[in-house]
């Protein structure tokens, strides 16, 4: 007797007919897929996607406090302490006293950190292009705008 049943390992079940997955579910699916691919890209450099994100934040806004970096990098204040220690130990960032507030330490990108970002700029750009390859330029800009508006609505 031939078994005609098929299995669907690791494939999400289809939503009931006539319904679509929630936007929150779809955003989370995209975030997990992008993070997984980004982790694969930066792993050879010995960093994680979260660490890479923090470095890109510093590339755009160098000299942030730990709290500011945590918010901009989407991690908790507790997590940023370990992340900063790790990146500092690798020589990718440095900390120095804020001249306006001696109690505060500012986090700055080092030349080694900038070089790491430079090495990954092309592959990360290719990943982003892959993500939107089936969209027109106009759709890509609309997608970017919609994501930004959705984020601002919840911030």
Image (cartoon, rainbow, N blue to C red):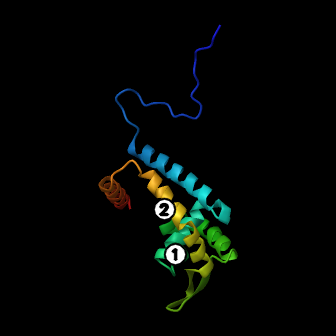
Q: Nearer the viewer, residue 32 or 65?
A: 32
- State how far apart marks 1 and 2 are (Cα): 18 Å
Residue 83 rendering spot, x and y as whole percentages: 63, 68
Does 51 sit above or below residue 4?
below
Marker disc for residue 58:
1
Judged from the image, the secondary structure of the residue bearing numbered disc 2 is helix
Residue 57 rendering spot, x and y as whole percentages: 50, 71
Q: Nearer the viewer, residue 99 or 12?
A: 12
Dot 1 or dot 2: first in sequence order is 1
Q: Residue furthest bottom?
A: 99
Judge left or right: residue 141 versus residue 40.
left
Q: Residues within 10 Å of mark 2 (few under 14, many from 20)?
A: few
Residue placed under numbered mark 2 in the picture: 125
Judge left or right: residue 95 versus residue 144.
right
- In which quadrant is the N terminus drawn? top right
Residue 142 rendering spot, x and y as whole percentages: 31, 55
Judged from the image, the secondary structure of the residue bearing numbered disc 1 is helix
Q: Residue at x 69, y 74 (%)?
A: 90
Q: Nearer the viewer, residue 124 or 68?
A: 124
């Amino acid at each position: 007797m031939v078994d005609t049943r098929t299995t669907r390992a690791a494939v999400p079940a289809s939503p009931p007919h006539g319904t679509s997955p929630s936007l929150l579910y779809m955003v989370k699916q995209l975030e997990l897929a992008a993070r997984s691919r980004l982790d694969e890209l930066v792993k050879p450099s010995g960093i994680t996607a979260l660490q890479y994100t923090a470095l890109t934040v510093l590339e755009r806004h160098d000299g942030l406090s730990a709290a500011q970096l945590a918010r901009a990098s989407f991690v908790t204040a507790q997590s940023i302490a370990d992340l900063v220690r790790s990146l500092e130990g690798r020589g990718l960032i440095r900390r120095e006293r804020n001249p306006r507030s001696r109690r505060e330490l500012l986090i700055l990108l080092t030349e080694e950190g900038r070089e790491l970002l430079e090495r990954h700029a092309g592959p990360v750009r290719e990943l982003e292009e892959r993500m939107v390859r089936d969209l027109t330029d106009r759709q890509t800009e609309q997608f970017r705008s919609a994501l930004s508006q959705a984020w601002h609505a919840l911030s």
